[in-house]
Image (cartoon, helix red, strand yellow):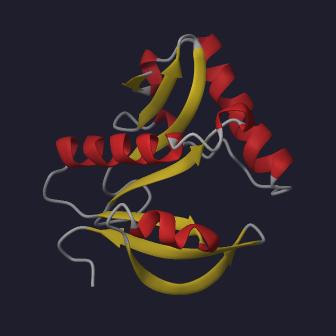
Amino acid sequence: MTLQSLTFSELTTDLLYQILQLRMEVFVVEQACYYQDADGLDKHPETQHVILWDDNQIAAYARVLAPGTSYDNYSSIGRILNPMAYRGKGLGHKIVAGSIALCEKHWPDVDIKISAQAHLQAFYNSHGFVVATEIYLEDGIEHIGMIRGGNAQ
């Protein structure tokens, strides 16, 4: 398996279609969460689309956002997913670790903030994230704000 990161302008139309199809499959259909996925942040010049490839199949995906894009003083990781066929293989850990490394490479002096589904708190704790907010509803699903870095409490 190989990890790749691409900006929006580096994505082919076929790859963009695959990514959007997977995001809709997991977040909209599977989780029955109706929200505006195409939020404009995919096209930001500093956004990185992180893909874990299994030959020519997407085994995991995440979107890395620059400071000031989603949160004023933090970089961020979101839209993290594994297609159903790749679950239970530890690939979520690989895509998150790769995304953290990318944040640290591009913005080494900036902490990372995420809006995590609350039931995944222990998963993100294992990657150095700590709880920064109370539980809140986002698109009908319980979430919790978490931060990784020197300013995390």
Indicate the quadrant where residue 73 lies.
bottom left
Give the image location of residue 8, x and y in percent: 46, 26
Q: Nearer the viewer, residue 118 or 133?
A: 118
Q: Nearer the viewer, residue 24 or 87?
A: 87
Give the image location of residue 57, x and y in percent: 61, 17
Indicate the quadrant where residue 137 lies.
bottom right
Q: Nearer the viewer, residue 29 or 53?
A: 53
Residue visible at 54% across and 36% down in the picture: 61
Q: Quadrant of the N terminus?
A: top left
Query: Which residue is farthest left?
Result: 109
Image side of residue 74 versus residue 62, left or right: left
Give the image location of residue 93, x and y in percent: 45, 48
Residue visible at 20% across and 60% down in the picture: 110
Residue visible at 59% across and 24% down in the picture: 58
Q: Quadrant of the C terminus?
A: bottom left
Image side of residue 121 versus residue 2, left or right: right
**Residue 13 to residue 148: above or below:** above
**Residue 53 to residue 20: above or below:** above
Give the image location of residue 33, x and y in percent: 81, 57
Number of numbered tags placed on the structure image: 0
